[in-house]
Amino acid sequence: MTQSLSLEPRSAVGNPSVATPDLFGDAIPFLKPWLGEEEAEAARQVILSGWICQGPKVAEFERLVASRIGVRHGVATNSCTSALHLTLRLNGIQEGDEVVLPTWTCMATANAIHQCGARPVFGDIDSRTYNLDPMSAEAAITPATKAIILVHQIGLPGDIDAFRALAARRNLILIEDGACSFGATYRGKAIGSHGSPTCFSFHPRKMITTAEGGFIATDDAELAEKARILRSTGASISDLERHRAMGALVQQYEDFGYNYRMTDMQAAIGLVQLRKLEAMLNARAAQAKFYDDSFQDSPDIEPPHVPSDRTHCFSSYLVRLRRGIDVNAVARFVMHRGVPVRMGIQPLHKEPFYAERWKGYSFPESEAAAAETLFLPIFPGLNQSAQETIVKVLRDAVAQESSASKG
Ligand SMILES: *Cc1c(COP(=O)(O)O)cnc(C)c1O
């Protein structure tokens, strides 16, 4: 049976349509994907059809996601990391090249660069949007730089026009990492539709989910076609085409490739999720507004800043605490009272893997953001009474730490 897309919570905190067993219990979860009978039924139908690997559902998912974004081509993959890797490789990024990216991002962005044999070079972020700062990115450019990855971090688009201008002026490739920004807009148009290849993630932490999954959105037919070949062992024809030709077609290999395929079971789940996207965007926007309003009068808790030319899809909600307040102590206090929070993103240049190479470098805005920010729970199904609890507990914790920091 089809299920309504209502977001009415089933209990004090909870998602309306979660299949049992519920691993999340009664406590407020940090996040919880909105999955239910419809997704289960869609996956079941694919299983019973006998074609469970990449096939017609993936093709349909690609068409509909590309159309929602407003691009001509979409290539589904098994993760955003693999989507970024394919996009970098197909843009010629290889050993000896450098790629500029923000240090305040997920390790996965940098991993895709390493997978090409190239070197990630970090830039700092803008203190208000937490996105790569164009001036810092420009300062990181060397003769070896081939590309810039603009990450639209935690759901807020970066300054795409500034980066398009920079890339054109310095003759660099621009790639967008929109992993957590599916559904966000910049200057009235969806992320992914601004002219540079853009990669998305469908991990449960992102806007819609296929369990694991990724996507390349592009207007470039050649890039899309080559990405389809490389994601599937480098074969010139797909498994489905070969199956339909009953073995009469033989694939050829013009290059080595990967197994970066999404399955039809995942795509079927994604098609249901896609129908829920507008409801999810609305739910997250309303939850963000509730938090914003609640912290409006607080001198110690700063809600996210959203420039007027873009929309935030709030895959995450990040607050900034007044400098001097011990974020770790606040996090311990609220977690002890059953409110799950997470520390803000920690800059990559401080990770053990990079510490030696980046010793002596400082990215002050990223370091400050790491020391002063906290993620609060936000997901469709989080209800207002849970949000009231979260706000109250956070305000109590901050009041206590604030007086400690002044005293
Ligand atoms: C989650 C995330 C990724 C990685 O996505 P996967 O699908 O897990 O590979 C890459 N970049 C950013 C900014 C992310 O948030």
Image: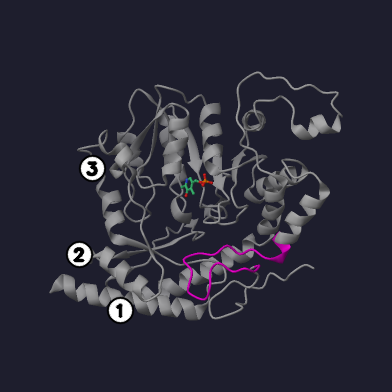
First in sequence: mark 3 vs mark 2: 2
Under mark 2, the amino acid is Gly
Span of residues in magenta = 19-39
Distance Cα–Cα, label 3 vs label 1: 33 Å
Does residue 23 belong to the magenta stretch? yes
Q: Can you give x and y, in whole percent of width and height, for residue 299 in the image?
A: 27, 73
Distance Cα–Cα, label 3 vs label 2: 20 Å
Q: Residue at x 60, y 52 (%)?
A: 211
Q: Residue at x 52, y 71 (%)?
A: 286
Q: Can you give x and y, in whole percent of width and height, for residue 292 in the image?
A: 41, 71
First in sequence: mark 2 vs mark 1: 2
Residue 362: numbered disc? 3
Q: Is mark 2 within 8 Å of ligand 1?
A: no
Under mark 3, the amino acid is Ser
Q: Can you give x and y, in whole percent of width and height, for residue 144 in the image?
A: 37, 23
Task: Tell me if residue 233 can be seen.
Answer: yes
Up/down of 206 relative to 138, above or below: below
First in sequence: mark 3 vs mark 1: 3
Under tag 2, what secondary structure? loop
Q: What residue is pinned by disc 1?
A: 396
Under mark 1, the amino acid is Asp
- The answer to whether the residues at label 3 and label 1 have Cβ atoms under 8 Å apart is no
Distance Cα–Cα, label 2 vs label 1: 16 Å
Under tag 3, what secondary structure? loop
